[in-house]
Image (cartoon, rainbow, N blue to C red):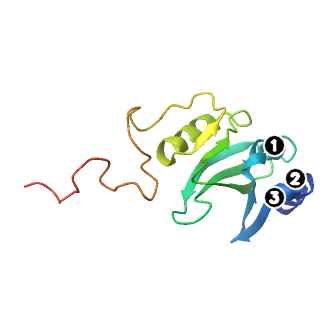
Amino acid sequence: MSVQAAVDRLKAQFGEAVVAVSEFRGETTVVVKKDDIVAICSFLKKELGFNFLTDLCAVDYLGQAPRFMVVYQLYSIGAHQRLRIKAAVEEGDARIDTVSGVWATANWLERECYDLMGIVFNNHPDPRRILMPSDWVGHPLRKDYPVQGPDREPYQGRLQ
């Protein structure tokens, strides 16, 4: 099945939950509503064969609404095809359901996304920080995070 056929089946199954579809340089991106992310990902894995979550990350569009976009990079091992799924997340409610029940690897990727961007994954089995110390304040990959870190003097160059 081609990526376009998979997108057509996704749109037929979920209708209004599919917000937009775009293609750029041979890569297809589908923007979906965050409320349906688990059902959509389950369908993509079980029915359409996207059995490998290669990456999960977030993008910070500081100053725009919605501020965040959670990005899922999927791969079909049997068909050798890639598909990108995006779900918008508002700054005031930076939460989305976990897909760790669909792909086990999402457990680690969602923890990294929470740690660095501050997006909470509802019903996550282990929502601890993964890179930063547990008492760290803030989320370092957000665009409004101070470059030098919280409560530190700005970097003045190498000490003599």
Left or right of residue 94, residue 51 in this image: right
Q: Which mark is residue 39?
A: 1
Q: Position of residue 55 (x, y in %)?
A: 61, 48
Q: Are marks 2 and 1 in contact (CB under 8 Å)?
A: yes
Quadrant including the N terminus: bottom right
Q: Are marks 3 and 2 in contact (CB under 8 Å)?
A: yes
- Label 3 and label 2: CA atoms lie apart by 6 Å
Quadrant including the C terminus: bottom left
Q: Residues within 10 Å of mark 1 (few under 14, many from 20)?
A: few
Q: Position of residue 57 (x, y in %)?
A: 58, 50
List the residue tagged with mark 3: 18
Q: Which residue in the rendered view is the most extreme toward the top?
A: 125
Looking at the image, residue 15 lies above or below residue 114: below
The residue positioned 84% from the left and 63% from the top of the image is: 4
Secondary element type, mark 2: helix
Q: Residues within 10 Å of mark 3 (few under 14, many from 20)?
A: many
For the question of whether residue 52 can be seen, the reply is yes
Secondary element type, mark 1: helix
Q: Which mark is residue 14?
A: 2
What amino acid is labelled 1 in the image?
Ala
The residue positioned 54% from the left and 45% from the top of the image is: 113
What amino acid is labelled 3 in the image?
Val
Q: Position of residue 122 (x, y in %)?
A: 65, 36
104 or 75, nearer to the observer: 104
What amino acid is labelled 2 in the image?
Phe
Left or right of residue 96, residue 46 in this image: right
- Label 2 and label 1: CA atoms lie apart by 9 Å
- Label 1 and label 3: CA atoms lie apart by 12 Å
108 or 35, nearer to the observer: 35
Whichever of callouts 1 and 3 sits on the residue coming sooner in the sequence is: 3
For the question of whether residue 77 can be seen, the reply is no
